[in-house]
Amino acid sequence: DVKVTQSSRYLVKRTGEKVFLECVQDMDHENMFWYRQDPGLGLRLIYFSYDVKMKEKGDIPEGYSVSREKKERFSLILESASTNQTSMYLCASRTPGAGHEQYFGPGTRLTVT
Amino acid sequence: GQNIDQPTEMTATEGAIVQINCTYQTSGFNGLFWYQQHAGEAPTFLSYNVLDGLEEKGRFSSFLSRSKGYSYLLLKELQMKDSASYLCAATTGANNLFFGTGTRLTVIP
């Protein structure tokens, strides 16, 4: 079974802190994704990565950066957390190709105070 | 641009049939996914349609009409555990999915 894990289920940070969200997948997937999910807005893509060292901006990259140094690990970084970044963050991975599903991690609920 | 619409909420009775509709306008459309997401949990894959027609998988079926930009998810013999959000997502190109805002289904006794 594919397994996507995220470093924390719940996280509380203060405004201005640097925040790291880690995601690890165990199925050797090339593609990895970071989304945020907010009520009424659905899943919105922040960044994605086709392969190691590669990254592309999604729909809402402002205020975020990512790192993909190893194939199994994709990190999301909030350089200076703000209250409007309070959200559920979901990581996903997949094999490239149109018909391949995305496998999601359990999510990290981040609260910025 | 990409636009995906689905109803925000639906309610149905245990044992009944419910149809959740999804319309999409995307450039370079490849196929359409349906995911189920229980409250507080990650989305899980339900179905993928690339050709027109109905795909049946147990109590769940999914339909696609590419010419109309339309899909639906059909749930039969509803059970209380089917209460969840159902996400429609269009795929364009090889790597990205565009999600709708989800339909929250409540199954009542």
Image (spheres, coloured by chain):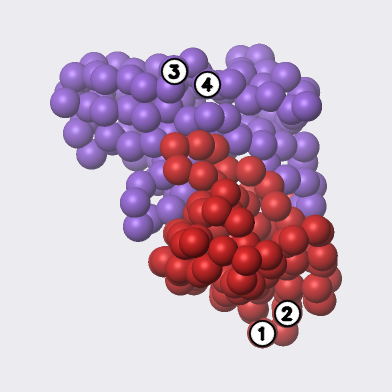
Chain colours: A purple, B red
Give A106 or B96, whichever is nearer the viewer: A106
Q: Are marks 3 and 4 in contact (CB under 8 Å)?
A: yes
Instruction: Tell me, for residue A6, which label it has, or none.
Output: 4
| Cα separation between marks 3 and 4 | 6 Å
Q: Residues within 10 Å of mark 1 (few under 14, many from 20)?
A: few
Q: Which residue is painted at 82% across and 65% down in the image?
A: B56
The label nearer to you, 1 versus 3, is 3
Badge 1 and badge 3 both on one subunit? no
Q: Residues within 10 Å of mark 4 (few under 14, many from 20)?
A: many
| Cα separation between marks 2 and 1 | 5 Å
Which residue has dot 3 on it? A8
Give A100 or B47, whichever is nearer the viewer: B47
Instruction: Tell me, for residue B68, which label it has, or none.
Output: 1
Badge 4 and badge 1 both on one subunit? no
Q: The residue under label 2 is which amino acid type?
A: Ser
Which residue has dot 2 on it? B65
Q: Position of residue A76 (x, y in %)?
A: 45, 25
Q: Are marks 4 and 2 in contact (CB under 8 Å)?
A: no
Q: Which residue is painted at 70% across and 52% down in the image?
A: B46
| Cα separation between marks 4 and 2 | 36 Å
| Quadrant in the rendering for residue A87 | top left
Q: Position of residue A51 (x, y in %)?
A: 69, 28
Instruction: Tell me, for residue A61, which label it has, or none.
Output: none
| Cα separation between marks 1 and 3 | 42 Å
Quadrant of the drawing holding the C terminus of chain A: top left
Q: The residue under label 1 is which amino acid type?
A: Lys
Q: Are marks 2 and 1 in contact (CB under 8 Å)?
A: yes
Q: The residue under label 3 is which amino acid type?
A: Ser
| Cα separation between marks 3 and 2 | 40 Å
Q: Which residue is painted at 71% across and 37% down in the image?
A: A94
